[in-house]
Image (cartoon, rainbow, N blue to C red):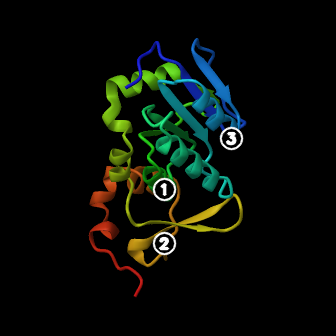
Amino acid sequence: MPSNKEKTLVCQLDARAENVKSEGVTLTHSAVSCLNEATMKAYGLIILCFSTRSIRARSEIFELCNCLKHNSLTCKAPIFALIDRWHRAVVWRLKEAGLDFIDVRQSPNRIDSEYISNCILNTAVSNQIDQVMLRLCPFLNYKPLNGRSELITCGAWRDRMVLGGKRLHEVCESENHLYCEYFQNPRPKK
């Protein structure tokens, strides 16, 4: 676990976000520069900040996470991803790549590395990727419409129900999905 005194590497792949200035934070803006920086110096925490909306950029993020977790110089540093919205397929791929912690940015324009370090040190369980996967309904399906948008459907109801708004956020992307009538009585495609 990182201490508040260890250096933090922030890979800011989302141009809209702004890093909160704090001592010991190095900022990069591409996957290549992040990997280069991570292998040049020792960091106690690596933060990946990106948007799940960019379908084309996802593979680069999965590859970066995989490289960081399988490189002998960087494998011990915990990796924390800050995303703009929950996306079960992205979270699953990040889990496979070795990501340790994940959260949705509460303030989409700020990255506070001290707050993230404190989250890991004090309340790590709620941000552990395995715990996040349990909160997201396994029947969430994402169908790309173009390079930046997807249709989210309910696989428990043969992908006939489009999800969004209140139901998506309060039921499908929370523990409440366990009580959903569609989750409890699925009718998957034949």
Residue beneath disc 1? 93
Q: Is residue 170 left or right of residue 179?
A: right
Measure the alpha-carbon separation of dots 2 and 1. Answer: 24 Å
Residue 19, visible in the rendered structure = no
Q: Is residue 170 left or right of residue 104?
A: left
Q: 143 or 178, which is in the foreground?
A: 143
Residue beneath disc 3? 32
Q: Quadrant of the N terminus?
A: top left
Q: Quadrant of the C terminus?
A: bottom left
Q: Looking at the picture, which amino acid does disc 3 mark?
A: Val
Local packing at callout 2 (Cα closer than 10 Å; few below 14, some 14-19, many 20+) is few
Residue located at (66% from left, 60% from top): 149
Residue beneath disc 2? 161
Q: Looking at the picture, which amino acid does disc 1 mark?
A: Arg
Q: Is residue 139 left or right of residue 28?
A: left
Locate residue 121, reporting x and y percent: 35, 23
Residue 189 marker:
none
Q: Looking at the picture, which amino acid does disc 2 mark?
A: Met
Pointers 3 and 1 in contact (C-beta within 8 Å): no
Earlier sequence position, callout 2 versus callout 3: 3
Locate residue 87, reporting x and y percent: 51, 54
Locate residue 62, reporting x and y percent: 56, 51
Whether 97 is drawn above or below 183: the answer is above
